[in-house]
Image (tube, helix red, strand yellow):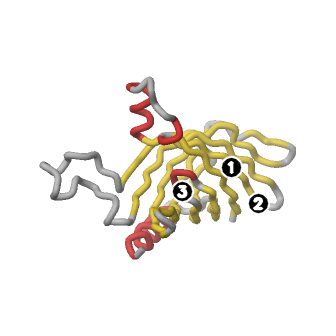
Amino acid sequence: MQNLKVIFFLGVFLCSLHGRADWRAIVERAGFFGKYSLGVSYEWRPEHAVDFSAGVYQIEAQDYYQANFVYRYSRWNVPFYGHNWRPLQFGAFAVYALDRDRYFLQSPGKYPYGDYYDETALRYGAEFSSTLTFFPSRLAVALRVRIFDNGLIAIYNNSERDIQYYVSSGLSLQYLF
């Protein structure tokens, strides 16, 4: 949990160095970002944003934590009856599991060599989303679809793939500061 706090506050600090921008508080039913996650989003221009969040996932009814980071590009910002709609956003994300007993950055010593299995604590992938921001309430709702790195490889290499292991969706509620 201590690592999660350090990662989160470092991300907020780095974002604050840029100057004037829009901040959003995020609550998400998150798919690959955990059963749910809480975090902040920082937009330094209407097209560019980064999100930092802490997610919670369960294994055998016990809660574990992960840190999430997303860069998101929004090419289109469409006025929509006095609100703002970003119909298609593209992004890249990274997820870092903080449970050292179940996940690793290199294969544990019991395997023949250090990279015997792929790392599991750090995963990354692609994100596609759409966000609608309501004014004057400054609330937003977003739908996210995320694909893990191994899912992108499986889509290319494996005709017998089971998409549920590689693709996840999330629903986000946001407040624009």
Indicate the secondary structure of the residue bearing disc 2. loop
Mark linked to residue 142 = 1
Mark linked to residue 169 = none
Query: Which residue is the site of mark 3?
Result: 51
Mark linked to residue 138 = 2
Indicate the secondary structure of the residue bearing disc 3. strand
Q: CA distance from mark 1 to mark 2?
A: 13 Å
Q: Is residue 121 left or right of residue 162?
A: left
Q: Amino acid at mark 2?
A: Arg
Residue for point 39% across, 76% down: 2
22 in relation to 89, above or below: below
Label 2 or label 3, whichever comes before in sequence order: 3
Q: Position of residue 151 (x, y in %)?
A: 44, 37
Q: Dot 3: within a 10 Å radius of its alpha carbon, few (fewer than 14), some, or many (20 or more) residues?
A: many
Q: Give the camera-side residue of 123 and 45.
A: 123
Indicate the secondary structure of the residue bearing disc 1. strand
- Residue projecting furthest to the front: 60
- Residue projecting furthest to the bottom: 2
Q: Position of residue 24 (x, y in %)?
A: 64, 61
